[in-house]
Structures are given as structure tokens and as C-alpha cells.
């Protein structure tokens, strides 16, 4: 049976708060970066496109970053919830090719109404980002941590490796 390509649209801050509910010692930016590292690992291992949408709380305001991980920050008066729902509505029947990751039941109901599927953030974490897959909740690999260090690759390093192994996006 052929696997249908799916694109995942992630309710960014919803996922961040589910991943790191009690980590007050880290800034929101640190939590967001750790979540994005984990999402990038998921994207690379599954070859599924991931777009993470955040409410417009970024210092640069509304912008789209289409790097290795597609990130979108909404404008200050336009929530990630509204963006996700409006985007799905604009897709028409193509919405069936998308999976929305959020625990916000309003978004989930609207995703279903548009023909998309949804996965609760907790289920996505358990299935795709959990420690059962060999990753810590911080996104670091559990094995060989002492041998190879626990530092994360920069975006420039990731892009270099992707280019080296022919995995660049078009």
C-alpha cells in the first residue's frame, strides 16, 4: 500500500508548552529552539514537510522563514489558530493532504471540517518526539552523547550536511 505524502502544520506554542510545561529556567526562545530541533529531526527522518506556526510574538513581527524547517510568525493581531484555519480553508480539497498538530480542540474541529486530519500535540510528542525513539525531550540523542558531545548543529552546519548528502530542498 502506497503511503500518501502528508504535510504537518504544527501549532507552535501549543506544542512548545506541551513539551516543556515545567521548565521555567528556560526562556520561551530556548524552548522554541529545542522544539524546532526536535521537529527538524522528525522532518528529516520521515521526509514529511513540517510548517510550524507561531502567534506573532516575535521581535521581527510577522514573517516566514523557509529554511530547513518552515516557520511562520503571524502578525500581532492574527493568531496562529486563525492562520491555520484560514490556510486549510484556502486549500479546498487539498486540505486532506495535511495533518494539523495541536491540542486546541477548536483547531482540530476546523481541521476535520476542512478535510484535514489532526493529531493532538501530546500524541505527536509520544509517537514522533518521545524518548522511545532514542531522543531526549531536548532533542539530543541519548546514545553516544559522551563520545560525540551534546551540542546542537547550527543551521549552517545542517545545510552543509544536507548539501553534502544531496538532501537539499528545491
Image (tube, rainbow, N blue to C red):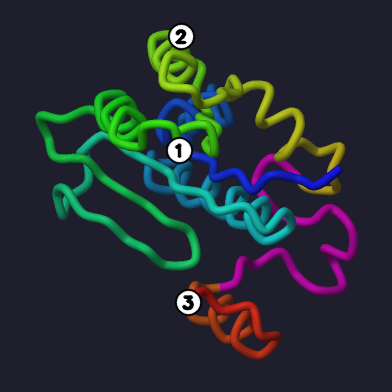
Which label number is shown at residue 105? Answer: 2
Residue beneath the point at 80% across and 74% down: 148
Q: Position of residue 34 (x, y in %)?
A: 54, 49
- Foreground: 4 or 107? 4
Position of 132 relative to 58 (above/below): above
Q: Position of residue 1 (x, y in %)?
A: 86, 42
Packing grade of label 3 (10 A; few <14, some 14-19, many >=20) is few
Q: Position of residue 145 (x, y in %)?
A: 82, 63
How far apart marks 3 and 1 lie (CA) works out to 21 Å
Compare marks 1 and 2 and give the one earlier in the sequence: 1
Name the secondary structure under disc 1: helix
Numbered disc in front, either 1 or 2: 1
Residue beneath the point at 20% across and 38% down: 56
- In the picture of the structure, the residue carrying the numbered disc 3 is 170
Q: Is residue 59 left or right of residue 41?
A: left
Give the magenta-colored segment's residue range: 136-153
- Foreground: 149 or 38? 38
- Dominant SS in magenta: loop
- In the picture of the structure, the residue carrying the numbered disc 1 is 94
Amino acid at each position: 500500500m502506497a503511503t500518501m505524502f502528508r504535510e504537518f502544520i504544527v501549532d507552535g506554542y501549543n506544542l512548545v508548552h506541551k513539551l516543556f510545561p515545567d521548565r521555567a529556567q528556560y526562556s520561551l526562545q530556548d524552548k522554541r529552539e529545542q522544539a524546532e530541533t526536535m521537529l527538524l529531526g522528525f522532518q528529516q527522518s520521515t521526509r514529511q514537510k513540517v510548517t510550524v506556526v507561531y502567534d506573532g510574538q516575535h521581535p521581527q513581527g510577522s514573517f516566514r522563514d523557509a529554511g530547513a524547517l518552515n516557520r511562520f510568525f503571524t502578525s500581532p493581531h492574527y493568531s496562529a489558530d486563525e492562520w491555520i484555519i484560514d490556510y486549510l480553508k484556502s486549500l479546498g480539497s487539498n486540505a486532506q493532504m495535511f495533518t494539523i498538530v495541536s491540542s486546541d480542540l477548536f483547531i482540530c474541529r476546523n481541521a476535520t471540517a476542512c478535510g484535514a486530519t489532526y493529531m493532538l500535540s501530546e500524541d505527536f510528542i509520544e509517537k514522533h518526539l518521545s524518548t522511545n525513539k532514542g531522543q531526549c525531550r531536548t532533542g539530543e540523542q541519548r546514545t553516544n552523547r559522551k563520545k560525540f558531545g551534546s551540542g546542537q548543529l547550527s543551521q549552517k552546519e545542517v545545510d552543509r550536511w544536507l548539501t553534502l548528502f544531496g538532501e537539499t530542498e528545491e
